[in-house]
Amino acid sequence: MTEFFVSPAKALFALDLWDAADIVPRDIVLPGPGRALLGAGGAVLRVGPRRWWLDGAGLIADEALAGRGGLTEIGGGWARVRLVGDWRDLVMQSGLFDAEAPAFDPGAVAVTPLCHAPCVLHVRAQTWCEVFVAASHLAHCLAHWRELGWQQGVGT
Amino acid sequence: MRAGSGIDGEAMRFTFDGKAYWGVDGDTLAAALMANGVRLLARSFKYHRPRGIMAMGVEEPSALVTLGEGARAEPNVRASDVFLYPGLVATSQNAWPSLRHDVGAVNSLVSALIPAGFYYKTFFGPPSRWMIYERFIRRAAGLGRPPQGADPDRYGHRAAFCDVLVVGAGPAGLAAALRAVEAGRRVILVEQDALPGGSLLRENVTIDGVPGAKWAARAVGRIRAAGGRVLMRTTATGHWDDNFVTAVERRVEPGQTSRGLAQVLWKLRCGDVILASGALERPLVFADNDVPGIMLAGAARALALRYGVAPGRRAVIATSHDEAYRTAFALAGLGVEIVAILDSRVDPQGALVNAARARFPVLVDARPLRGLRRGVALAGIDAMVGTTRRRFVADCLAMSGGMSPVLHLHRQAGGALDYDAARGAFLPGAARQRQTTVGAAAGEHDLRAILDLSKIDDPLGPVAPAEPGPIWRGEAHGKAFVDFQNDVTTADLALAQREGYVSVEHTKRYTTLGMGTDQGKLGAMVALAQIADERGLPLPQAGLTMFRPPYTPVTLGAFAGPARGDHAAPIRRLPLAEAHDDLGALWVPAGAWMRPRAYLRPGESLGEASLREARMVRSLAGVVDVSSLAKFEIAGPDALAVVEAVCATPVARLGVGRGRYTVMLREDGMVMDDGTLWRLAEDRWLLTSSTGGAARMARHLSYVADILLARPRAAVINVSEHWAGLAFAGPRAAGLLAELTGQPVPAHMGLAQATIAGAPVRVLAASYSGERAFEVHVPAYRAAGVFAALVGAAQGVGGGVYGLDAMDHLRVEKGHVVIGAEADGRAIPADLGLGGMVRKSGGFVGWQALTRPALADCAERRQLVGVTSIDGAPIPEGAMLVVREGEEPVGHVTTSAPRVAGEGAIGLGLLVDGGARHGEALLAWSPTRKQCVSVQVGAPLFYDAEGARYRD
């Protein structure tokens, strides 16, 4: 099966900590570089030296940051595409990224262009991967992936 | 199955020049034609000489054909590098009316008139003469014709990463790949042939008790089983920096219909690269060494042992080293009579030579002088044996003038070369990248050494290293070719030297040596030896031309890959694209974005629609989608420092909930972008900037924050796509917006939070049109309802949507600059009338540059002006501003538009000392469009100079 499922990212927030990454607040559990943490309310993805994405509402309250960082809503700019099937091959046909690396396993995160579009990859399982695609590029990416034999599945 | 070969596949029908033949699966076209007795395959590039098979690989210079038909036709395919498929259609090239009877062969008769460099000499004299020559030259010479239709094939790109890339699946490559993969490394092995084995496919050897070809196939199985990736029919064409290698995989043969991708361009990022690219045999140089029937000894051996095809009935072997002796045994095995082995060495020794002496006439100090032709095929050889001329009757001459290691990728990767005088060949020297060369490409010739762990049974080996063939000094009459593809002879090389084109790079261009599709694979070393001899230099001092990618020709489709048609460039769609479609938007590309240009009514032209929409905004209310504008939030305790560094206008005193127009400069003081800056909270700002400059501005903000300010306690978040932006403008806009939100609208340059159609929105009171206006920002996934509400409200009073053209008309009337048009990268703020806004205290990027005398004194600089068409005629955009036609321009028109509030045409321009020239009459002159309009220079403001209409 090689299918993709598309939905708006909606409740997606950028968490920026003002200080360097090695001074992460001890009372907030955050994933390290290139990784994500899954929780009941959603996922936290490390997408930059001082930036995380909170994929889900209320994962970290503004108050918890206590002035050490800030939250910014960004969900309107991203579409969520779930790739089910040989997603590694699709990713490597769409960009110059080593999706076949053994370390790129469930829980891994990569920020990389695919089909010239800004994308964030979150490996959810060996058989599926979530790709956040910059919303304006979505139609272009999906058209390309359809040409590569992928089909849009029903639902999200 | 053909005797003595590995060919036992299905029979296949194919055609060559319309005539049907049968071949066998696994045959190359060259082998299949030879099996059918076809010796004449092509006509040469310049002299239209008959040509047959010279080589049996990618180095084949002469046997070029067109494969396939119609739009799928592929010209200049090497017959030796295409494998048979059912229904293959091959056509000869560069011959008329037929391959056998080619009128172009008359060129051979007048060859004295068209020596090397004649093409350049046709440029002498009046250009009109060249126009006459060109017609004949282009028609007389050439290769295949490209197809005229769009390529129906599909091409893909694929990335791959590995610890070790091995190029070449010959014995050395297979051994290297096996070692690496069994050591647990990620291995990719690429091989341009359809079968692994390389030289093993044309030798009678056994390895570990199995025939070489079978051993190779098993080795590939072991590599794959251990997790390695093996790509057959894949040619590594370029070796770039950082061990990045590009390789083209052929999934179907040229001209063959494909169900999936025809070719894939692999982009390989490699830890180590092992080049096992083998060696190419060199031809011998003698008169008429191109007659069909004369071929490389290795090619003859491959025909015999790989394809079971005898290249003739009576063969002469001519060589300068041992390896060609193998060919004698291979041909004899198919019943070919070996007329003689001509060895240029005086006293060749060794087991192989002795074995040959026992079976064949071996003549030493012997070499061919001239190929004899009957019709279009070889009839015999004149040779010099010792001091005696002898003639041999033969229909095949298998020759070998030494071996040239394939070092193209090594050189492309920056590797050095070492010259080996005994071999007369370059060997790989020090590598610049993590790359090594092994096997025959490294000069290794002993299979036992290459496969040190295997048991080799090679009854004819090992052989001594190959020595180069003798230098040709014109001992017989006739053309002695060094570059068979471009018809370059030893006489051409000598002429180039005589005429001063001594450098090998000059010789190359003067004679076209090595400039064909084969890039001199066969002839380069032979030619260098001839040039060195001519100049009396050791060969290395004769120089060496560059090794440039691609190693073999790559079809343009493979480079383009999926980037064709709608995918030729990424297209960005607005979040409200479907809603605009519903309203009848006419789309226009704006950078990577597609944006509505106008919304045409039935029977309306684009110009009429744009003007109607602009006037609608001036009189009522309109909505335009500005979602593509760049938007950045800058947040944190040090956010103000970031904003102050980026924006050239005063910002520190801007209150929360307020905004202002701002400009951003490059470090050289030129305006990079403009936009609006809003203070959302004490430590949070919103900066908007132009659509086209969005990526540049994102980079600039990162640069300022991360480099100049060294990671302040602040973050820059690109929220361009999170917020859809809808500008709501016109004298009725404020009232309608207040109704929609149920709250008072903010004052000009004020900011408010509100709700429209249930969606939370930001309302930014800013005007680009000159009317009272608001930018409504809403999360993109909720934009549809807000857009519908705003459009509905506007339509309720007779307004509606407007597009980019109307927006442009409105802003020209107000003299607002656009990045790219007025702010064209050469303008400082003062040039654009923005000098008064610049922060006097400095401290922003570009501030120091503005203090330079050249920028501080603006008198001689081009300054923004308005231009009005004196007679009302449209002003040509981009036209030069001149005093009189033909004079040096003093400026140019950056944008033009019809007047919205009134009639006639206006524009903006950049004019030398423009601020002091208001009232002056000039010409807007566009000689390329043959337009000239009289304009009057004035202030860049045509509407509501007091600003009364956009204020509260």
Image (spheres, rainbow, N blue to C red):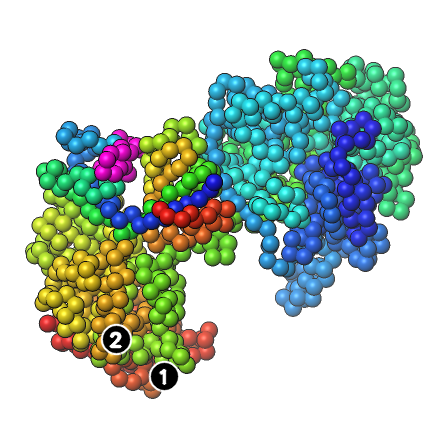
What residue is disc 1 on?
A: B873
Label 1 residue SS: loop
Q: Is residue A21 above or below residue B720?
A: above
Crowd class of label 2 (few under 14; some 14 to 19; many from 20; radius 10 Å): some
Q: Residue at x 81, y 45 (%)?
A: B21
Quadrant in which the C terminus of chain B is drawn: bottom left
Image quadrant of residue A39?
A: top left
Residue B525 in view, yes or no? yes
Q: Position of residue B159 (x, y in %)?
A: 47, 38
Principal secondary structure, stretch drawn in magenta: strand
B920 or B938: nearer the viewer: B938
Q: Position of residue B60 (x, y in %)?
A: 71, 40
Q: Is residue A146 magenta?
A: no
B648 or B389: nearer the viewer: B648
Q: Which residues make up the magenta segment? A: A32-53
Q: Residue at x 47, y 46 (%)?
A: A150
Q: Earlier in the sequence, mark 2 or mark 1?
A: 2
Task: Look at discs 2 and 1 and give the one toward the viewer.
Answer: 2
What residue is disc 2 on?
A: B795
Q: Is residue A103 above or below residue A155?
A: above
Q: Position of residue B544 (x, y in %)?
A: 60, 36
Image quadrant of residue A51?
A: top left
Crowd class of label 1 (few under 14; some 14 to 19; many from 20; radius 10 Å): some
Identify the amino acid type marked 1.
Ala
Q: Chain of mark 2?
A: B
